[in-house]
Image (cartoon, rainbow, N blue to C red):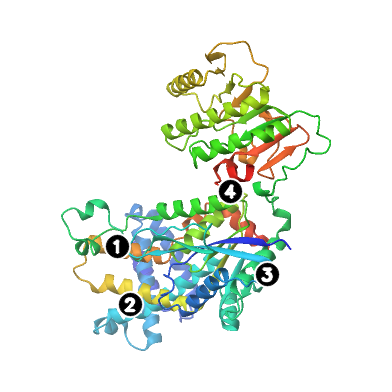
Amino acid sequence: MLYDVRMLVNHWYTLPNQKSYRANKRWGRFLLWLANVGGRHSHHQLQGSLAAASGLRELTQILAMCVGVPLEEIWKRPFSSNSLAACSMAEGSGQMVRGYLAKFYEPCDRVFNLEGEAGSNDLQSLGVPRSKVVNIDLTANVGQQIFETYRSIVDDSISRISPKRTKLSDFEWGPALPGYESTSSSLAMSDLHLGDGSGTERAQATIALKPHVERLNIDCIDIVGDLIQRDVPKVVSARHRETFLSALQHLSGSTSRNEKSIISVKVEVDSSVLANSKRMLEVQKELQTFAFKIGGRIELGDMTLGIPNDAPQNSIPVYMERGNHDEGERLEEVIPGAKLAPSMIRLDKSSGVLFCHGNIWNLPEVPLALK
Amino acid sequence: MEQESLVVVCGSDLSFPNAEAADLLSRFLFQLNSSVNGRPINASTSCVKALCFVPAPYGSEALIQSLSNHACVHHTLPCPSIPIPRGADFIGRHVSQVEGDVHLPLPDAYRTFQMQQAIRSQQRAGEPLMLHSHTPGMIGYHVRREALKRRYRSKPIPFVATHWTRYQPFVETRVVEIVDALRSNQSLTFNEFFTHGGLLERLIPALHEDQKYAPALNACSTTSGCW
């Protein structure tokens, strides 16, 4: 075994320019395997480490031959590590920054180039396709060029554009919609986001709906979701809810054609959201207080809160926490035929529902637009 | 003819108009500012409004303006080159003492929040919207992240960036400066080490969230129009 190991060492110390190199290599590998398998210290794999170390030494010798100076001499010389590090750092930081820029520009729809051909070539070297590069002329109107770029992006991806929402100010309240003059309709409000924006403005907008509710012959108001807002403080949400429902009570006078009708709120609770019994109790308590305050009646599941009365003809169903209505999710369950609203306010002709997206209540111009 | 409007939410890591080592970008921002503020009275059918996120000088009040009154407004965000101390750091110490000895308290959440709020409020108004990153630094990185996030959620907003070649040597110099400061200072404290490390990281953000939005990135690479 010692002989074999010595042969092995001799082999790895032998430069491969000998004629018998191939045979030695094969023989050395065989001996290495033998030593690893049957050697006394085979469990340490020392022979393999020895071979690797020897190989490294051999490589060093080859390198020394190439350099022309023994490497040991180089290690002994005084060495300015700072200057070497500075050079590599400058080069390394350049590569790092360029890699970063290439990565940064990857998801861009367009990249504005301010430097003509030089900038364009630089962008190409960063992997940005020429079709995405927009040369900006700083002597011309920059705003106009940005707008044209926006138009070109839109044109490129026309199939993926969702219909733009009609602004509330563009909605034609006008005369009764043709074909629907004698049809009674219902008003659906979704995504009220109680707690967001201004409660007063939301209440004013709700009250401002009254003449339109009368004109459009609306006899039912559906409120879809978000009477309980999860991401705002409960106190704020409750305050906004109270303001909103008070305004709704004022609006409900139009639906019943009486001076003042008893507001009846039907509350549907999503079990996944309000599974917490403590939370449920809080909601019950709050709704009870509210129902007494406005002299109304609230149905919460099987329970009736507030003033018990005969079922009014014009009830206002209120649904709570029924999914993300902004994306049309589960909205169809609540209002049959209702889909994702392409505009902030529209008349759904299939269901006869006047659909007001709740986001409009948070805009300050809503009360003005409705007047 | 109906006038079309476009709101550009843009972010720059260099303060305007004194953009350091970025005269070209400064000129671009100036032209943008003047073009949106002083639109020609003649038959221009397009109207561009710009909401710019810019770095805040240390210790200054946050600047938040409304687009309803102006065509070009600025929101300030904490700048990555300015360490932002915690309240506790000021107890019993002068501001000048605190400045050099603080960690960066990861103001990313604040930046994300401000940008989300601005974009969300613009989307609510139903106006056409575009995101524009003037520089690929930290604030630009957040603009890019918002674009990716919305693309990932199938509510894409067009996203553009501005490139000029002098930005690269500018950042390289800063990187070398930071590394030199780390290397040469023998009596470097842990606080200083982490502050410089944070600066380096924020000069070139890690883009590690790209993995999260990989589907949006892949969709972008296969089609010319990404949104």
Q: Mark 1 points at which residue?
A: B195
Q: Which of A132 and A332 is in front in this view?
A: A332
Q: Mark 2 points at which residue?
A: A85
Badge 1 element = helix
Are the residues flagged by discs 2 and 1 in contact, CB closer than 8 Å? Answer: no
On the picture, is B109 further left or further right than A205?
Answer: left
Amino acid of disc 1: Thr
- Quadrant housing the C terminus of chain A: top right
Badge 2 element = helix
- Quadrant housing the N terminus of chain A: bottom left
Mark 1 surroundings: few (<14), some (14-19) or many (≥20) residues within 10 A: many
Q: Which image quadrant for residue A267?
A: top right
On the picture, is A87 further left or further right than B163?
Answer: left
Q: Mark 3 points at which residue?
A: B44
CA distance separating discs 4 and 3: 25 Å
Q: Which image quadrant for residue A353?
A: top right
Amino acid of disc 2: Ala
Q: Are marks 4 and 1 on the same chain?
A: yes
Amino acid of disc 4: Arg
x, y percent for residue A229: 50, 34
CA distance separating discs 3 and 1: 49 Å
Looking at the rendered image, the disc whose residue lies closer to the viewer, 4 or 2, is 4
Are the residues flagged by discs 3 and 1 in contact, CB closer than 8 Å? Answer: no
Tag shown at residue B124 = 4
x, y percent for residue A53: 35, 68
Residue A24 visible here: no
Looking at the rendered image, the disc whose residue lies closer to the viewer, 4 or 1, is 4
Task: Classify A233 as above or below B8.
Answer: above
CA distance separating discs 2 and 1: 22 Å
Numbered label tally: 4
Q: Which of B33 and A67 is in front in this view?
A: B33
